[in-house]
Image (cartoon, rainbow, N blue to C red):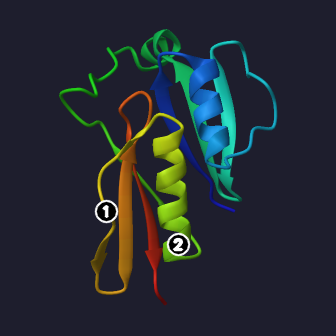
Amino acid sequence: MTMTFINLPVRDLTTAAEFYRSLGFTSEQAELDGDSQSFTISDGTRLMLHLRSAFEEYTGLTVTDTESSREVIVGVTTESREQVDELVDRAAVAGGESLGPGTTNGGLYMRGFRDLDGHQWSFLHMQG
């Protein structure tokens, strides 16, 4: 099986972990090494959260300022349009920023948010 690992820098690992748990992402262990934590999004997709200093050490570069630029937009599919709205609403309640109402383009329904560290996410439902 092919797996995808989404690695994101965060300011506060505990707060970020609580945020992603509120979206229903699960964690197999508390922390990997005190600087990182792994979450399961789906069978083939993991979210890896790293303290900014650990991320910078790993990449050898300064973390992007999410107030002035985007380094990536993470898109995750869902089972229904209702689940898209539910997840973005949960993100907003947990302190994230909803990017407005959902949009439809053909058979694709999408709605986005920014997490606590300004990383942009989109939940998508594709009618099939």
Q: Amino acid at mark 2?
A: Glu
Q: Which residue is mark 2?
A: 82
Q: Return the residue found at the far left.
A: 68
Camera-nearest residue between 47 and 87: 87
Camera-nearest residue between 47 and 86: 86
Q: Return the residue found at the far right.
A: 29
Residue 44, how many percent across, how many down?
66, 58
Provide the secondary structure element on which disc 1 rests: loop
- How packed mark 2 is, by other alpha carbons closer than 10 Å (few <14, some 14-19, many 20 or more), is few
Provide the secondary structure element on which disc 2 rests: helix
| Residue 33, image quadrant | top right
Q: Which residue is mark 1?
A: 101
How far apart marks 2 and 1 lie (CA) works out to: 12 Å
Q: Return the residue found at the far front.
A: 93
Asked if residue 78 lies left or right of residue 33, the reply is: left
Q: Earlier in the sequence, mark 2 or mark 1?
A: 2
- Label ID, residue 123: none
Residue 111, how many percent across, how many down?
37, 61
Asked if residue 69 lies left or right of residue 7, the reply is: left
Q: Amino acid at mark 1?
A: Pro
Asked if residue 2 lies left or right of residue 80, the reply is: right
- How packed mark 1 is, by other alpha carbons closer than 10 Å (few <14, some 14-19, many 20 or more), is few
The answer to whether mark 2 and mark 1 are in CB contact below 8 A is: no
Do we see residue 77 in this rendering?
Answer: no
Residue at position x 50%, y 45% from top?
91
Residue 6, how many percent across, how many down?
52, 42
Camera-nearest residue between 40 and 98: 98
Residue at position x 28%, y 28% from top?
66
Residue at position x 55%, y 76% from top?
80
Do we see residue 37 in this rendering?
Answer: yes
